[in-house]
Image (cartoon, helix red, strand yellow):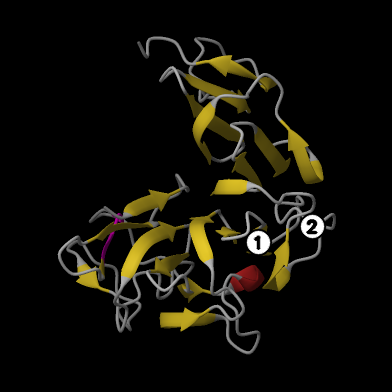
């Protein structure tokens, strides 16, 4: 079954599903009836319009999809042939064509033909390729592309020092990768660095994802550990203490 990810808690990011019987995408906007149309989400639903929707609409021209990830104002799909397609707002380079700021239907991201995992952050996207390397593009003000710089990129750049990743979780302004041996490395606002840093105490992780300024991991014993910003209790440890060391989420037995 395909996956659907949405990492922003701001008003109006798209929600999405992948249909099993026919691998096409259907999207529905999460904008409520009393919210006005927001100009920062143009074309995020991929139906060829800028109209907000309260019912699902099919993304134009996209078949063979196996994964989808939606961020604040754009969306990307991974197809069964391992290619990546994106649509919506192109600010900060989430869309590959530097001549356009937005696309109302999917456009192909060139040079990524062997992708196995995809995740869209707030203004950036990261993928894992078949050789275990991680590649990212888009906004890079906090080093969330992991290439050792803070330069925004319209074309995918390789994350420094990772060659055994199996999945990636892109958050608001940071990203994390799950390695084949079960450890996790992160970069960007999550660690305060522009190159990956190993997260201590995690060597048995089976899934990882990133939120606004925090990340969480599922471990082999089915427990969950989180780290990062905790101003709203997002680490789930019963405190409001921010920490870069993973803490266990309470009550998930």
Residue 210: give its label: none
Q: Main secondary structure of the magenta part?
A: strand
Q: Measuring from the top left, give residue 130's x and y in whole percent.
A: 57, 61
At label 1, counting other C-alpha atoms closer than 10 Å, the crowd grade (few under 14, some 14-19, many 20 or more) is many
Q: Is mark 2 on a helix, strand or loop?
A: loop
Residue found 53% across the figure and 21% down from its top: 225
Residue 136: give its label: 1
Give the Cα separation between the discs numbered 2 and 1: 9 Å
Q: Measuring from the top left, give residue 167's x and y in whole percent.
A: 53, 47
Residue underneath mark 2? 147
Numbered marks: total = 2
Q: Measuring from the top left, give residue 193's x and y in whole percent.
A: 81, 42
The image quarter in which residue 189 lies: top right
In the image, residue 172 above or below residue 88: above
In the image, residue 87 above or below residue 151: below
Magenta region: 26-31
Residue 116 visible in the current orientation = yes
The image quarter in which residue 101 lies: bottom right
Q: Does the magenta stretch include residue 243?
A: no
Left or right position of 145 against 100? right
Q: Does the magenta stretch include residue 30?
A: yes
Q: Between 37 and 227, which is closer to the camera in this rendering?
A: 227
Residue found 46% across the figure and 70% down from its top: 82
Quarter of the image with the C terminus in it: top left
In the image, residue 189 above or below residue 201: below
């Amino acid at each position: 079954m395909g996956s659907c990810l949405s990492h922003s808690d701001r008003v109006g990011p798209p929600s999405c599903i992948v249909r099993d019987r026919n691998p096409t995408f259907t999207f529905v906007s999460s904008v409520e009836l009393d919210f006005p149309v927001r100009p920062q989400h143009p074309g995020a639903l991929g139906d060829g319009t800028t109209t907000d929707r309260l019912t699902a609409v099919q993304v134009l021209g996209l078949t063979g999809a196996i994964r989808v990830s939606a961020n604040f104002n754009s969306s990307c799909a991974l197809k069964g042939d391992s290619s990546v397609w994106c649509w919506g707002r192109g600010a900060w380079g989430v869309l590959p064509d530097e001549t356009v700021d937005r696309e109302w239907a999917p456009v192909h991201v060139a040079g990524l033909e062997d992708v196995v995992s995809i995740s869209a952050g707030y203004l950036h996207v990261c993928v894992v390729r078949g050789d275990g390397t991680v590649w990212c593009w888009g906004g890079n003000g906090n080093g969330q592309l992991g290439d050792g710089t803070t330069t925004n990129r319209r074309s995918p750049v390789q994350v420094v020092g990772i060659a055994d990743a199996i999945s990636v979780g892109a958050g608001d302004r940071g990203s994390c990768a799950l390695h084949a041996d079960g450890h996790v490395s992160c970069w960007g606002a999550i660690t305060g660095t522009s190159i990956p840093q190993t997260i201590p105490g995690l060597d048995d992780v089976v899934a990882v994802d990133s939120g606004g300024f925090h990340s969480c991991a599922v471990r082999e014993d089915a427990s969950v550990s989180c780290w990062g910003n905790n101003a709203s209790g997002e680490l789930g440890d019963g405190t409001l203490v921010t920490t870069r060391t993973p803490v266990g989420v309470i009550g998930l037995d």
